[in-house]
Image (cartoon, helix red, strand yellow):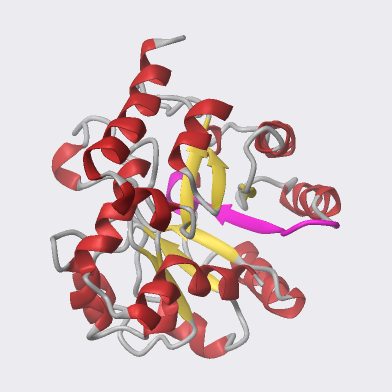
Amino acid sequence: MKRRTLLLSSSAIALARVHGEELASPAATLVDCQLYIGDHPRRDLPQFTPSSWAALGLKQGWVGHFGAFSSEANHQALNAELRQRCADLPGSVAAQSLDLSQQTWRRDLEAALAATARSKALLRLCPSLHGYDWKHPALGELLTLCSQRSLPVQVVAKFEDARTQRQDRPLPPLSLREVPTICERLPQLRLMLLNINATEAQVQLRGCRNLWLDSAMIEGAAGLAGLLGHWPKDRLCLGSYAPFFYAAALPLKLQEAGLPGLDHQALAHQNASAFLG
């Protein structure tokens, strides 16, 4: 077994043992909305295997491919590999990618939808890495199409804290300025922004009633509970951003929030189920 694979599996098992039965039961009810397979373009990260995946004990996990971060990716081939890998990870949902700066994006979209016609379909986009933003005509076209087809779409807003990035190769964040207008224009759109922090949610995205967020970069012991005081309770989902962050820490994050029963269940899995449809 590779060292990085062992690290992922060991971290999950160690956390479960330290906290005993407190983690074993809650984890089985959790939906993790942001996970990845494949090689990260800049970091040596652990890989999910069937055994390390099972150790997490998730009810469901939405899995994308780190290869989608590349501006030169063949997304039709990448999505085919992703679907094949997800077939070995029980409870996983393939978060398929598109690059709207490529002329082939419509063909890639139809191929992705055709391959998931009998299962849950989910898209995950990385606009800032592919050189376009919310004003790009193709993104407007795609979001309108997703709204019409009731197709959920995730958009990665940022990839790393600016303090941890290489200055010569920064990973640019996506502007949030246009998001409220898009949500107002497409009230039926199921849109989730990934890796938003609490300040961005409360300041730049305030009032976006039909927008979902994940929890990967909502930090602090009271981070989730604090945000829910300012954000719709049915529009926040759990996301680990694993293996960039540890997936095994997700149950702890929810436990530390100390939410009452109904809010706990909503954040654990109900909000995610409503988003995915």
One can see residue 172 in this view: no
| Residue 106 image point, x, y percent | 77, 54
Residue 128 is inside the magenta segment? yes
Residue 46 position (above or below residue 218): above
Q: Residue furthest front?
A: 21
Give the residue drawn at x 72%, y 47%.
103
Give the residue drawn at x 35%, y 32%.
13
Left or right: residue 256 compared with residue 173: left
| Residue 4 image point, x, y percent | 37, 18
Q: Say which quarter of the image contains residue 156.
A: bottom left
Q: Say which quarter of the image contains residue 117.
A: bottom right
**Part of the protein shown in magenta:** 118-129
Q: Nearer the viewer, residue 162 or 230?
A: 230
Q: Say which quarter of the image contains residue 137.
A: bottom right
Left or right: residue 103 compared with residue 159: right
Give the residue drawn at x 27%, y 76%.
259
Residue 213 position (above or below residue 30): below
Residue 146 is inside the magenta segment? no
| Residue 245 image point, x, y percent | 31, 40
